[in-house]
């Protein structure tokens, strides 16, 4: 731990006289000029004359920027004294309600408070719906989660959400889904969808280990189209393997 700073110090002294370790090239690829400026704000200017210093601090720079902004940062040395920096926005996938706030979870497994304007960057498209309520997230250790702003590893995996969306997210009827709650019933995951179209409201129950993906989606579409024409609000229970139960639903 001591040798490295001493070695860097010695090389720095030599370089002060000969400038033989100055930067030879640095390219920054960012989705927006504002992101590039954020990089230059934390760039150690001393390293322009001594590139090993930048190589030494590259990981810290990546970590800092990824903690402060919803981005992925990749710094690579492509040659002796030549570096490339790539900064790209995260891929927002879902919005969830937690701690009386709306959070975004990205496909890369990062989460941040959508109400924190300091985390907004150009081109970052946050989903507007549906809003997810996840029981396991609500039960997470709130005291163990950082209270300050920033971007953090997600407290929940969204792999199961990705599976659900691949089965139902592209369907026309899913456009009217406002909220999805993920609960537990008899030890299994239960999706509770709230769908609103005009004056009609529907609650749809789908058991994670029982839905048949596209087959169930097509059946639900047929049921919903019939109910849309008939009017009224309904509870649609699709937690059975071979049938869908429809009941009248009294809106709270």
Image (cartoon, rainbow, N blue to C red):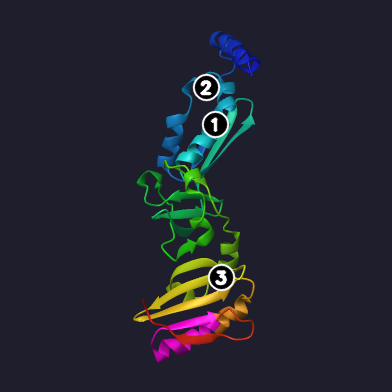
First in sequence: mark 1 vs mark 3: 1
Residue that appears at 43% across and 44% down: 32
Residue 110 visible in this rendered orientation of the protein: yes
Residue 97: give x, y in percent of width and height.
43, 58
Disc number at residue 60? Answer: 1
Q: Earlier in the sequence, mark 2 or mark 3?
A: 2
Element marked by disc 1: helix
- Mark 2 and mark 3: span between their CA atoms? 54 Å
- Is 77 rendered above or below residue 191? above
Say how many tags the image has. Answer: 3
Camera-side residue: 249 or 10? 249
Which span is picked out in magenta?
A: 220-237
Q: Which residue is mark 3?
A: 190
Please name the predominant secondary structure of the magenta segment in the image.
helix
Can you identify the residue that label 2 sits on? Answer: 47
Task: Look at the numbered discs 2 and 1 and tell me whether their residues touch, using CB distance below 8 Å.
Answer: no
Q: Quadrant of residue 162?
A: bottom right
In the rendered image, which quarter is residue 24 located in? top right
């Amino acid at each position: 731990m001591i040798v490295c700073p001493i070695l860097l110090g010695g090389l720095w002294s030599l370089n002060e006289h000969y400038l033989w370790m100055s930067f030879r090239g640095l390219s920054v690829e960012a989705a927006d000029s504002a992101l590039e400026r954020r990089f230059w704000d934390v760039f150690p200017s001393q390293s322009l004359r001594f590139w090993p210093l930048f190589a030494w601090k590259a990981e810290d720079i990546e970590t800092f920027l990824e903690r402060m902004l919803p981005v992925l940062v990749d710094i690579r040395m492509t040659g002796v004294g030549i570096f490339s920096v790539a900064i790209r926005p995260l891929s927002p996938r879902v919005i969830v309600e937690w701690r009386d706030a709306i959070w975004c979870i990205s496909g890369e497994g990062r989460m941040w408070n959508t109400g924190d304007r300091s985390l907004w960057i150009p081109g970052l498209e946050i989903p507007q719906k549906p809003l997810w309520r996840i029981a396991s997230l609500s039960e997470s250790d709130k005291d163990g989660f950082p209270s300050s702003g920033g971007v953090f590893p997600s407290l929940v995996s969204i792999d199961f959400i990705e599976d659900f969306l691949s089965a139902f997210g592209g369907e026309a009827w899913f456009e009217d889904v406002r909220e999805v709650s993920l609960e537990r019933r008899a030890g299994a995951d239960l999706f509770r969808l709230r769908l609103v179209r005009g004056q009609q409201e529907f609650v749809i129950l789908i058991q994670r280990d029982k839905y048949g993906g596209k087959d169930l989606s097509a059946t639900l579409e047929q049921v919903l189209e019939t109910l849309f024409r008939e009017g009224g609000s309904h509870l649609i229970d699709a937690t059975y393997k071979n049938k869908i139960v429809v009941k009248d639903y009294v809106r709270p």
